[in-house]
Amino acid sequence: MIFSTPAIPEPLPPAQLCCTSPFIVDIKPEDFKQHPDIMSILKLHARSIYNAVGLPAFEVELITKYGMFRAAATGAGHKAFEEQQEVLDCDPTRFHGQGVMRAVKHVNEFIGPSLCNQCLLVTEQAKLDSFLREMNHHTDLGCPALLAISRAICRAGAVARDMPLSAYIAHLAGTKMVLPLPVILAVTCDNPDRIFCSYYFVPKSATSIKEALTMVADCVGALRALLRDAHGLFGTNVSQDGGFALTDMAEREVFLTLVTAINHAGHGGHVLIAVATSDANPCAGPRLESLRSIIREFPVEVIYTHPASPAQNTGDLRSLIGPVKLHTEWRGGPLENGQLQPLWTRPGALATVTDAIDMVRKSSSVALMRGPEGTEDAFLADLSTGLGVSQVITGGMCRSEHVAKFNQLLRIEDDLSKGEFVVGALRRDTQCG
C-alpha cells in the first residue's frame, strides 16, 4: 500500500497561535491604518468547557481577519447577584442542571451574528460592551457569557493597538499600571459557626511580584510541613479553592498555625494575614470579644467582609478593628463618585470590562477576588494590573488555575522591568505601550 505524503499546511498567524498573550503577536500598526476592516469582528463562536471543579464554564472565540482571540469565564458564584446571575440549562440530566448550553446556543445563533452586523471595531470596547448589555436585556445570556465576550474583544483590541493587554486596559481606563499585591489563600474553614471562613497570606514587605510569590510559597511549604507533622497526611487535604481545609481546627489554633508557618519560613513581620468573614455580621453576640482578641494578638492586615445587614452597624466593626483595613464586598448596583469605603468584588459581578473600569473610577480602593471555580484563563492578572487595583485576591498555590494567574503576573512584571515597581503601590509613573 502506497501512502501519499500530506501537504504541509501554511503556518497560522501569530494571533491564532497564542491568542491569550498579545505580547508576542507581530502586527505592524500601519497594517490597521491601511486596512481598518482587520479590526472588525467576523465571527463569534461559543462553546462549553470545564472549570476547575468539573462543571461547565463558558468559552468564546472572537475571529477577525487577522486571527482568533479566546476568553473563558465562570459564574458569579454568589446567589446575591441579581442582574449578574449565571444562566443555566436547568436540565437535571446534565451536570445537575448546571450546564451552559442555553447561553452557548444564544451566542452562536443570535448574539454573534448581531454583534458582527454592528460594524464596530474591536477597539471600541465601551460601545461593544454597551451593545452586549442591551442584548442581555432581550435574551437569556448571563454574566459569564457577557464577561467572556467582553474579554475576547479586549484581547483583540490590545493586538489592534499593538499594546500588551494590561497596558491596553490601562489605556481604556485612563489609569496608571500597578502591579497588584497578590493576597493568596492559605486555609479554608467551611463552617458557618466560624467568624472567618478563609485565611490568606499577605506578603506586605515584598517589592516585586517575584519576591511576593516566593515569600508565600515559602510560607505554604512551611504550613504543609506543620500540618503533616501534627495531623498526618489527612491534615494537608486541599479545598477546591486551593487552601488547606481545616474545618475542625479551632479558630485561634488556625491563627497560631499560620503565624508559626510564617516564622518557620523566615518571613515573620514581612508576611501578614488577611481573613474573610463568614457572613455580614461578625460582631454579633459572643463573636465580638473573640474578634477583638484575635485583632490584638495576631498580625491581621485586612478583613474582607460582606454587605452589612440593616441591623448591623458597620461603624462598630470599623471602631473595633482599629488600624486593620476593612474591605466590603460589592455585588453590583450603583456607586457614588469618590466612594471612600474600600471594596472587594469578584470578576463575576462585573459583566463587562467597561463595568470594571467604571467601578475603579468611582472607588478609592478596590481589590479583585478570584471567582469560586476558575479556568486556566489568566485575564484577571492583566485586568488587575491595567486597572491599578491595590490587591488581587487569589486561591491557593495548590491549584493550577490559580498558578496560571501568578505566572501571568510574573510575565507582566518581566515585560515592565525597565521601570521601578513596588508591589501594591497606589501610583506608578511608568507605562508600557
Image: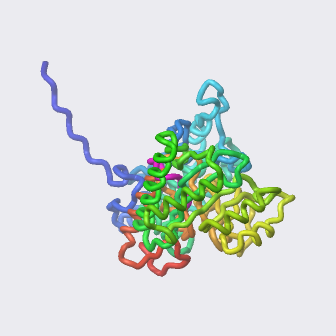
Residue 209 position by quadrant:
bottom left
Quadrant (top left, top right, bottom left, bottom right) of the N terminus: top left
Residue 289 position by quadrant:
bottom right
Please give the range of residues in magenta: 393-401
Q: Is residue 398 magenta?
A: yes
Q: Answer above or below: position of 415 versus 403.
A: below
Along the line of sight, the residue nearer the viewer: 363 or 24 = 363
Q: Residue 162, can we see it? A: no
Quadrant (top left, top right, bottom left, bottom right) of the C terminus: bottom left
Q: Residue 257: image x %, image y %?
A: 55, 56
Looking at the image, residue 21 sits to the left or right of residue 240; the answer is left
Q: Measuring 68% from the left and 43% from the top, which residue is drawn there?
A: 139
Along the line of sight, the residue nearer the viewer: 306 or 413 = 306
Q: Residue 115, can we see it? A: yes
Q: Is residue 360 magenta?
A: no
Q: How many marks do you count on the picture?
A: 0
Q: Measuring 55% from the left and 44% from the top, which residue is drawn there?
A: 239
State the residue lying farthest toward the top: 1
State the residue lying farthest toward the front: 230
Along the line of sight, the residue nearer the viewer: 390 or 259 = 259
Q: Measuring 42% from the left and 60% from the top, which residue is drawn there?
A: 218
Q: Residue 318: image x %, image y %?
A: 75, 70
Q: Measuring 37% from the left and 73% from the top, which residue is drawn there?
A: 417
